[in-house]
Image: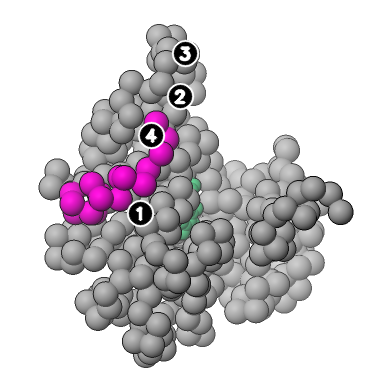
Amino acid sequence: MSFINNWLRPDIKAINVYHVPFSNDMVKLDAMESPFSLSNTLIGQYLADIQLNRYPASASANELQQTLRELMDIPDEFGVLLGNGSDELIQLLALACDAGDTILSVDPSFVMYGMIAKFTRLNYLSVALTNDFEIDADAMQRVIETHSPKLIFIAYPNNPTGNAFDRTVIEKIITSSNALVVLDEAYYAYANDSFLLDIKKYPNLVLLRTVSKIGFAGLRLGLLIAAQDMVAALDKLRLPYNINTLTQVSANFLLKEKKEINQNSQIILKERIKLSSTLGAISGLQVYPSQANFILFKTQNANLLFKFLKVNGVLIKDLSSIPALTDCLRATIGTQTQNQTFINLVKRFYDWE
Ligand SMILES: *Cc1c(COP(=O)(O)O)cnc(C)c1O
Protein backbone atom coordinates (compact mmCIF):
# COMPACT_ATOMS: atom_id res chain seq x y z
CA MET A 1 0.00 0.00 0.00
CA SER A 2 1.31 3.39 -0.94
CA PHE A 3 1.56 6.20 1.58
CA ILE A 4 -1.35 8.16 0.12
CA ASN A 5 -3.57 5.08 0.11
CA ASN A 6 -3.09 4.66 3.83
CA TRP A 7 -3.38 8.33 4.53
CA LEU A 8 -6.46 9.40 2.57
CA ARG A 9 -10.00 9.45 3.98
CA PRO A 10 -11.69 6.23 2.79
CA ASP A 11 -14.74 8.10 1.45
CA ILE A 12 -12.50 10.29 -0.72
CA LYS A 13 -10.51 7.25 -1.86
CA ALA A 14 -13.74 5.71 -3.12
CA ILE A 15 -14.59 8.69 -5.35
CA ASN A 16 -13.79 8.69 -9.05
CA VAL A 17 -11.90 11.78 -10.20
CA TYR A 18 -14.12 14.21 -12.15
CA HIS A 19 -13.76 12.92 -15.68
CA VAL A 20 -13.36 15.24 -18.65
CA PRO A 21 -13.53 13.25 -21.91
CA PHE A 22 -10.95 13.68 -24.66
CA SER A 23 -12.38 16.08 -27.23
CA ASN A 24 -9.57 17.31 -29.50
CA ASP A 25 -10.84 18.19 -32.99
CA MET A 26 -14.38 17.08 -32.12
CA VAL A 27 -17.63 19.00 -32.45
CA LYS A 28 -17.92 19.60 -28.73
CA LEU A 29 -21.55 19.49 -27.59
CA ASP A 30 -21.07 17.85 -24.19
CA ALA A 31 -20.42 20.56 -21.61
CA MET A 32 -22.84 23.45 -22.15
CA GLU A 33 -20.12 25.77 -23.34
CA SER A 34 -21.07 28.55 -25.72
CA PRO A 35 -19.69 27.92 -29.21
CA PHE A 36 -19.03 31.65 -29.68
CA SER A 37 -15.76 33.27 -28.67
CA LEU A 38 -15.66 36.98 -28.21
CA SER A 39 -13.05 39.48 -29.35
CA ASN A 40 -10.23 37.00 -28.93
CA THR A 41 -8.06 39.00 -31.29
CA LEU A 42 -8.14 41.94 -28.87
CA ILE A 43 -6.85 40.02 -25.88
CA GLY A 44 -3.27 41.26 -26.35
CA GLN A 45 -4.42 44.84 -25.71
CA TYR A 46 -5.42 44.49 -22.11
CA LEU A 47 -2.84 41.89 -21.21
CA ALA A 48 -0.07 44.31 -22.13
CA ASP A 49 -0.14 46.34 -18.92
CA ILE A 50 -0.97 43.88 -16.17
CA GLN A 51 1.42 43.09 -13.37
CA LEU A 52 1.58 39.40 -12.63
CA ASN A 53 4.24 39.84 -9.96
CA ARG A 54 1.57 41.54 -7.81
CA TYR A 55 -1.54 40.12 -6.17
CA PRO A 56 -4.73 41.22 -7.93
CA ALA A 57 -5.25 44.96 -7.37
CA SER A 58 -8.50 44.54 -5.52
CA ALA A 59 -8.86 41.50 -3.29
CA SER A 60 -12.61 41.52 -3.82
CA ALA A 61 -12.46 42.52 -7.50
CA ASN A 62 -14.66 45.61 -7.16
CA GLU A 63 -14.50 46.71 -10.77
CA LEU A 64 -15.42 43.24 -11.95
CA GLN A 65 -18.41 43.20 -9.61
CA GLN A 66 -19.61 46.39 -11.26
CA THR A 67 -19.15 44.90 -14.74
CA LEU A 68 -21.21 41.87 -13.72
CA ARG A 69 -23.93 44.04 -12.17
CA GLU A 70 -24.32 45.84 -15.48
CA LEU A 71 -24.20 42.67 -17.58
CA MET A 72 -26.84 40.90 -15.49
CA ASP A 73 -28.95 43.91 -14.34
CA ILE A 74 -28.28 43.26 -10.66
CA PRO A 75 -29.84 45.98 -8.46
CA ASP A 76 -27.38 48.03 -6.36
CA GLU A 77 -29.18 47.08 -3.16
CA PHE A 78 -28.05 43.44 -3.50
CA GLY A 79 -24.61 42.19 -2.58
CA VAL A 80 -22.38 40.21 -4.96
CA LEU A 81 -19.74 37.65 -4.02
CA LEU A 82 -17.39 36.33 -6.69
CA GLY A 83 -16.13 32.78 -6.99
CA ASN A 84 -13.62 30.82 -9.04
CA GLY A 85 -16.58 29.38 -10.96
CA SER A 86 -19.90 28.96 -9.18
CA ASP A 87 -18.56 25.59 -8.06
CA GLU A 88 -16.35 27.45 -5.61
CA LEU A 89 -19.39 29.28 -4.26
CA ILE A 90 -21.27 26.00 -3.74
CA GLN A 91 -18.25 24.86 -1.74
CA LEU A 92 -18.17 28.14 0.21
CA LEU A 93 -21.83 27.68 1.19
CA ALA A 94 -21.10 24.14 2.35
CA LEU A 95 -18.15 25.43 4.40
CA ALA A 96 -20.54 27.79 6.16
CA CYS A 97 -22.46 24.79 7.51
CA ASP A 98 -21.87 23.07 10.83
CA ALA A 99 -20.82 19.46 11.41
CA GLY A 100 -23.90 17.25 11.13
CA ASP A 101 -25.85 19.68 8.93
CA THR A 102 -27.83 18.44 5.95
CA ILE A 103 -27.82 19.63 2.36
CA LEU A 104 -30.95 18.91 0.35
CA SER A 105 -31.47 18.90 -3.40
CA VAL A 106 -33.43 17.01 -6.02
CA ASP A 107 -32.44 14.10 -8.21
CA PRO A 108 -31.33 14.14 -10.96
CA SER A 109 -29.63 17.50 -10.68
CA PHE A 110 -26.17 19.06 -10.74
CA VAL A 111 -23.68 16.49 -9.44
CA MET A 112 -21.48 18.99 -7.58
CA TYR A 113 -24.07 19.54 -4.82
CA GLY A 114 -23.65 15.95 -3.66
CA MET A 115 -19.91 15.85 -4.33
CA ILE A 116 -19.22 18.97 -2.29
CA ALA A 117 -21.46 17.73 0.55
CA LYS A 118 -19.27 14.65 0.60
CA PHE A 119 -15.98 16.59 0.54
CA THR A 120 -17.16 18.73 3.45
CA ARG A 121 -18.58 15.75 5.39
CA LEU A 122 -22.13 17.08 5.42
CA ASN A 123 -25.23 14.90 5.09
CA TYR A 124 -26.71 14.92 1.62
CA LEU A 125 -30.31 14.12 0.72
CA SER A 126 -32.04 14.36 -2.61
CA VAL A 127 -35.71 14.00 -3.45
CA ALA A 128 -36.52 12.22 -6.71
CA LEU A 129 -38.12 14.38 -9.39
CA THR A 130 -41.48 13.27 -10.78
CA ASN A 131 -41.67 11.50 -14.16
CA ASP A 132 -41.97 14.83 -15.95
CA PHE A 133 -38.95 16.17 -14.02
CA GLU A 134 -40.89 18.44 -11.68
CA ILE A 135 -40.20 18.79 -7.96
CA ASP A 136 -42.32 16.39 -5.90
CA ALA A 137 -43.69 19.07 -3.59
CA ASP A 138 -45.13 16.72 -0.96
CA ALA A 139 -42.02 14.56 -0.73
CA MET A 140 -39.90 17.69 -0.51
CA GLN A 141 -42.00 19.09 2.35
CA ARG A 142 -41.76 15.80 4.24
CA VAL A 143 -37.97 15.76 3.99
CA ILE A 144 -37.77 19.41 5.01
CA GLU A 145 -39.90 18.70 8.09
CA THR A 146 -38.08 15.55 9.15
CA HIS A 147 -34.49 16.57 8.39
CA SER A 148 -34.46 20.39 8.71
CA PRO A 149 -31.84 20.90 5.99
CA LYS A 150 -29.44 23.80 6.44
CA LEU A 151 -29.01 24.37 2.70
CA ILE A 152 -31.31 23.57 -0.22
CA PHE A 153 -29.87 23.67 -3.74
CA ILE A 154 -32.25 24.02 -6.67
CA ALA A 155 -30.90 24.50 -10.18
CA TYR A 156 -33.31 26.79 -12.05
CA PRO A 157 -33.37 25.71 -14.89
CA ASN A 158 -32.21 22.27 -13.88
CA ASN A 159 -29.17 20.43 -15.22
CA PRO A 160 -29.31 17.73 -16.67
CA THR A 161 -33.06 17.83 -17.38
CA GLY A 162 -33.19 21.35 -18.87
CA ASN A 163 -36.59 22.36 -17.47
CA ALA A 164 -37.32 25.16 -15.00
CA PHE A 165 -39.36 23.83 -12.08
CA ASP A 166 -42.78 25.15 -11.13
CA ARG A 167 -42.20 28.55 -9.53
CA THR A 168 -44.95 28.18 -6.90
CA VAL A 169 -43.38 24.95 -5.62
CA ILE A 170 -40.05 26.72 -5.18
CA GLU A 171 -41.70 29.66 -3.42
CA LYS A 172 -43.33 27.24 -1.01
CA ILE A 173 -39.96 25.63 -0.28
CA ILE A 174 -38.42 29.05 0.40
CA THR A 175 -41.20 30.19 2.74
CA SER A 176 -41.79 26.92 4.56
CA SER A 177 -38.23 26.06 5.58
CA ASN A 178 -35.55 27.58 7.76
CA ALA A 179 -32.91 26.58 5.23
CA LEU A 180 -30.82 28.91 3.15
CA VAL A 181 -32.31 28.23 -0.29
CA VAL A 182 -29.84 28.49 -3.16
CA LEU A 183 -31.29 28.92 -6.62
CA ASP A 184 -28.58 28.07 -9.11
CA GLU A 185 -29.30 30.09 -12.24
CA ALA A 186 -26.35 28.91 -14.33
CA TYR A 187 -28.67 28.93 -17.38
CA TYR A 188 -30.37 32.27 -16.66
CA ALA A 189 -29.53 33.58 -20.14
CA TYR A 190 -31.66 30.88 -21.76
CA ALA A 191 -34.58 30.85 -19.31
CA ASN A 192 -37.97 32.60 -19.26
CA ASP A 193 -37.89 33.35 -15.57
CA SER A 194 -35.52 34.29 -12.75
CA PHE A 195 -35.67 34.69 -8.98
CA LEU A 196 -33.28 37.66 -9.03
CA LEU A 197 -35.79 40.25 -7.83
CA ASP A 198 -37.28 37.82 -5.29
CA ILE A 199 -34.13 38.34 -3.19
CA LYS A 200 -35.93 41.46 -1.89
CA LYS A 201 -38.81 39.33 -0.63
CA TYR A 202 -37.06 36.36 0.95
CA PRO A 203 -34.25 36.80 3.49
CA ASN A 204 -33.23 33.12 3.11
CA LEU A 205 -32.80 33.25 -0.68
CA VAL A 206 -29.44 33.24 -2.46
CA LEU A 207 -28.84 33.15 -6.22
CA LEU A 208 -25.89 31.66 -8.05
CA ARG A 209 -24.91 32.61 -11.56
CA THR A 210 -21.90 31.98 -13.74
CA VAL A 211 -20.40 33.25 -16.98
CA SER A 212 -19.52 29.68 -17.97
CA LYS A 213 -22.67 29.05 -20.00
CA ILE A 214 -22.68 32.43 -21.80
CA GLY A 215 -19.33 32.20 -23.52
CA PHE A 216 -16.66 32.35 -20.83
CA ALA A 217 -16.24 28.90 -19.30
CA GLY A 218 -12.47 29.33 -19.48
CA LEU A 219 -12.48 32.35 -17.17
CA ARG A 220 -13.78 30.34 -14.19
CA LEU A 221 -16.01 33.05 -12.81
CA GLY A 222 -19.24 32.67 -10.88
CA LEU A 223 -21.20 34.95 -8.61
CA LEU A 224 -23.46 34.72 -5.61
CA ILE A 225 -26.17 37.35 -5.34
CA ALA A 226 -28.00 37.98 -2.08
CA ALA A 227 -28.91 40.63 0.47
CA GLN A 228 -25.91 42.79 1.46
CA ASP A 229 -25.69 41.43 5.02
CA MET A 230 -25.77 37.84 3.74
CA VAL A 231 -22.91 38.54 1.31
CA ALA A 232 -20.87 40.34 3.97
CA ALA A 233 -21.17 37.32 6.28
CA LEU A 234 -20.38 34.70 3.62
CA ASP A 235 -17.44 36.78 2.40
CA LYS A 236 -15.56 35.74 5.55
CA LEU A 237 -15.20 32.26 4.04
CA ARG A 238 -13.79 33.43 0.71
CA LEU A 239 -10.08 32.95 0.21
CA PRO A 240 -8.43 36.32 -0.48
CA TYR A 241 -7.64 37.05 -4.14
CA ASN A 242 -9.72 34.08 -5.29
CA ILE A 243 -10.32 35.75 -8.65
CA ASN A 244 -6.92 35.93 -10.32
CA THR A 245 -5.65 38.95 -12.25
CA LEU A 246 -5.91 37.30 -15.67
CA THR A 247 -9.58 36.49 -15.07
CA GLN A 248 -10.31 39.93 -13.66
CA VAL A 249 -8.82 41.91 -16.53
CA SER A 250 -10.21 39.55 -19.16
CA ALA A 251 -13.69 39.62 -17.67
CA ASN A 252 -13.67 43.40 -17.26
CA PHE A 253 -12.82 43.72 -20.90
CA LEU A 254 -14.95 40.97 -22.43
CA LEU A 255 -18.08 41.16 -20.26
CA LYS A 256 -18.64 44.81 -21.16
CA GLU A 257 -19.81 43.58 -24.57
CA LYS A 258 -23.33 43.13 -23.23
CA LYS A 259 -25.02 43.53 -26.59
CA GLU A 260 -22.89 40.92 -28.33
CA ILE A 261 -23.22 38.49 -25.41
CA ASN A 262 -27.01 38.85 -25.47
CA GLN A 263 -27.09 38.45 -29.25
CA ASN A 264 -25.14 35.20 -28.95
CA SER A 265 -27.65 33.94 -26.36
CA GLN A 266 -30.48 34.78 -28.77
CA ILE A 267 -28.79 32.76 -31.51
CA ILE A 268 -28.54 29.78 -29.14
CA LEU A 269 -32.23 30.16 -28.25
CA LYS A 270 -33.27 30.09 -31.92
CA GLU A 271 -31.03 27.10 -32.56
CA ARG A 272 -32.52 25.31 -29.55
CA ILE A 273 -36.04 25.73 -30.91
CA LYS A 274 -34.95 24.47 -34.33
CA LEU A 275 -32.99 21.53 -32.94
CA SER A 276 -35.82 20.54 -30.57
CA SER A 277 -38.36 20.33 -33.35
CA THR A 278 -36.01 18.54 -35.78
CA LEU A 279 -35.06 15.95 -33.16
CA GLY A 280 -38.67 15.67 -32.02
CA ALA A 281 -39.79 14.79 -35.54
CA ILE A 282 -37.65 11.66 -35.55
CA SER A 283 -39.88 8.76 -34.63
CA GLY A 284 -39.01 7.01 -31.38
CA LEU A 285 -37.09 10.01 -30.15
CA GLN A 286 -38.56 12.01 -27.26
CA VAL A 287 -37.33 15.56 -26.68
CA TYR A 288 -37.81 17.15 -23.26
CA PRO A 289 -38.65 20.85 -22.97
CA SER A 290 -35.58 22.99 -22.30
CA GLN A 291 -34.95 26.44 -20.89
CA ALA A 292 -31.19 25.99 -21.08
CA ASN A 293 -28.51 25.81 -23.78
CA PHE A 294 -28.83 22.05 -24.07
CA ILE A 295 -31.45 19.49 -24.95
CA LEU A 296 -32.18 16.27 -23.12
CA PHE A 297 -33.71 13.54 -25.24
CA LYS A 298 -34.67 9.93 -24.85
CA THR A 299 -34.24 7.37 -27.55
CA GLN A 300 -33.80 3.68 -28.23
CA ASN A 301 -30.18 2.57 -28.33
CA ALA A 302 -29.01 5.77 -26.64
CA ASN A 303 -25.66 4.21 -25.86
CA LEU A 304 -25.13 3.10 -29.45
CA LEU A 305 -26.14 6.50 -30.80
CA PHE A 306 -23.68 8.17 -28.42
CA LYS A 307 -20.87 5.94 -29.69
CA PHE A 308 -21.88 6.43 -33.33
CA LEU A 309 -21.75 10.21 -32.87
CA LYS A 310 -18.42 9.96 -31.11
CA VAL A 311 -16.66 7.92 -33.80
CA ASN A 312 -18.01 10.45 -36.29
CA GLY A 313 -16.50 13.37 -34.40
CA VAL A 314 -19.44 14.71 -32.37
CA LEU A 315 -19.21 14.57 -28.59
CA ILE A 316 -22.43 14.83 -26.56
CA LYS A 317 -23.19 13.51 -23.07
CA ASP A 318 -24.37 10.00 -22.33
CA LEU A 319 -26.64 10.02 -19.28
CA SER A 320 -28.25 6.65 -19.93
CA SER A 321 -26.61 4.98 -16.93
CA ILE A 322 -28.41 7.31 -14.48
CA PRO A 323 -31.49 5.38 -13.28
CA ALA A 324 -33.98 8.24 -13.75
CA LEU A 325 -32.50 8.98 -17.18
CA THR A 326 -32.49 5.56 -18.87
CA ASP A 327 -31.92 5.95 -22.63
CA CYS A 328 -31.26 9.69 -22.24
CA LEU A 329 -28.62 11.78 -23.95
CA ARG A 330 -27.84 15.47 -23.55
CA ALA A 331 -26.64 17.69 -26.36
CA THR A 332 -25.37 21.23 -25.90
CA ILE A 333 -26.59 23.71 -28.51
CA GLY A 334 -23.73 24.64 -30.83
CA THR A 335 -23.41 26.84 -33.88
CA GLN A 336 -25.84 26.30 -36.73
CA THR A 337 -23.19 24.29 -38.60
CA GLN A 338 -22.36 22.12 -35.57
CA ASN A 339 -26.03 21.45 -34.89
CA GLN A 340 -26.54 20.48 -38.53
CA THR A 341 -23.60 18.06 -38.38
CA PHE A 342 -25.09 16.57 -35.22
CA ILE A 343 -28.62 16.24 -36.59
CA ASN A 344 -27.42 14.72 -39.89
CA LEU A 345 -25.60 12.02 -37.96
CA VAL A 346 -28.63 11.31 -35.77
CA LYS A 347 -30.79 10.97 -38.86
CA ARG A 348 -28.23 8.70 -40.49
CA PHE A 349 -28.12 6.53 -37.37
CA TYR A 350 -31.88 6.04 -37.43
CA ASP A 351 -31.90 5.93 -41.23
CA TRP A 352 -34.53 8.69 -41.21
CA GLU A 353 -34.77 11.47 -43.75
C1 LIG B 1 -22.42 24.34 -15.26
C2 LIG B 1 -23.12 24.49 -13.98
C3 LIG B 1 -22.49 25.11 -12.90
C4 LIG B 1 -20.99 25.33 -12.88
O1 LIG B 1 -20.63 26.60 -13.08
P1 LIG B 1 -19.10 27.05 -13.03
O2 LIG B 1 -19.27 28.51 -12.84
O3 LIG B 1 -18.51 26.68 -14.34
O4 LIG B 1 -18.42 26.40 -11.88
C5 LIG B 1 -23.22 25.33 -11.74
N1 LIG B 1 -24.50 24.93 -11.65
C6 LIG B 1 -25.13 24.32 -12.66
C7 LIG B 1 -26.55 23.89 -12.50
C8 LIG B 1 -24.46 24.07 -13.86
O5 LIG B 1 -25.06 23.41 -14.83
Q: Which residue is mark 4?
A: 240
Asked if the magenta segment contains residue 195, the reply would be no
The kind of residue tagged 3 is Asn
Tell me if the residue at label 1 has its CB under 8 Å from ligand 1. yes
Percent coordinates x, y for residue 280 in the rendering:
56, 70
Tell me if the residue at label 4 has its CB under 8 Å from ligand 1. no
Tell me if the residue at label 2 has its CB under 8 Å from ligand 1. no
Specify which label sits upstream in the sequence, 4 or 2. Answer: 4
Specify which label sits upstream in the sequence, 1 or 4. Answer: 1
Mark 4 Cα shell of 10 Å, populated few (<14), some (14-19), many (≥20): some
Bounds of the magenta span? Answer: 226-242
The kind of residue tagged 4 is Pro
Mark 1 Cα shell of 10 Å, populated few (<14), some (14-19), many (≥20): many
Q: Which residue is mark 2?
A: 246
Q: Is residue 278 visible?
A: no
Q: Are marks 3 and 2 in contact (CB under 8 Å)?
A: no
Q: Which residue is mark 1?
A: 208
As displayed, is residue 341 above or below residue 54?
A: below
Percent coordinates x, y for residue 13 in the rendering:
72, 59
